[in-house]
Image (cartoon, helix red, strand yellow):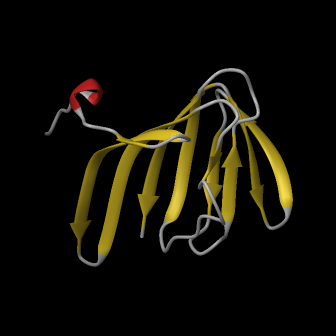
Amino acid sequence: MKVVNINEIVAQENRAFSLRTLFEEENQNTTVKIGTVTIHPGERVPLTCVSNHEENEYSVIVKGTILTEIDDKQIRVSAGQATFIPAGKEHIAFNDGKEACELVFVLVG
């Protein structure tokens, strides 16, 4: 068993978000990455263009809300809800609220 303290993980930060990768493991051609993201009010992720990756993305919104866009559809996701984005799907997340949006993500691919 491995235990990490989230507050001791150095975050990747930019104007829009703060990201911490908690675990990243590769076994038999499968990679799993688990982390946290805080999207600041008025910001979008990614900063430009769209996000598109080879892994399935699972997220749980812990605090706040975000407006997501996938397949030209906008969906609001709030604390207490979870999302699944299939590998290869272009998507963005926009925090149009007044508080930071915090989520936990798992990438599997």
Number of residue marks: 0
Residue 54 lies, with reference to residue 70, above or below; the image says below
**Quadrant assignment, res 2:** top left
40 on left or right of 2: right
53 on left or right of 13: right
Q: Identify the residue at the far left of this view.
A: 1
Residue 75 lies, with reference to residue 18, above or below; the image says below
Q: Identify the residue at the far bottom of this view.
A: 29
**Quadrant assignment, res 10:** top left
Residue appearing at x 51%, y 40% in the figure: 17
Residue appearing at x 60%, y 26% in the figure: 100
Q: Identify the residue at the far front of this view.
A: 15
In the depicted view, which residue is nearer to us: 3 or 19? 19
20 on left or right of 18: left
Residue appearing at x 52%, y 65% in the figure: 56
Residue 10 lies, with reference to residue 52, above or below; the image says above
Query: Residue 109, position in %: x, y?
Result: 42, 70
Residue 63 lies, with reference to residue 109, above or below; the image says above
Query: Residue 53, position in %: x, y?
Result: 51, 70
Query: Residue 43, position in %: x, y?
Result: 65, 40
30 on left or right of 85: left
**Quadrant assignment, res 69:** bottom right
Quadrant containing the N terminus is: top left
In the depicted view, which residue is nearer to us: 27 or 73? 73
Query: Residue 55, position in %: x, y?
Result: 47, 68
Q: Identify the residue at the far right of this view.
A: 73
Residue appearing at x 62%, y 55% in the figure: 84
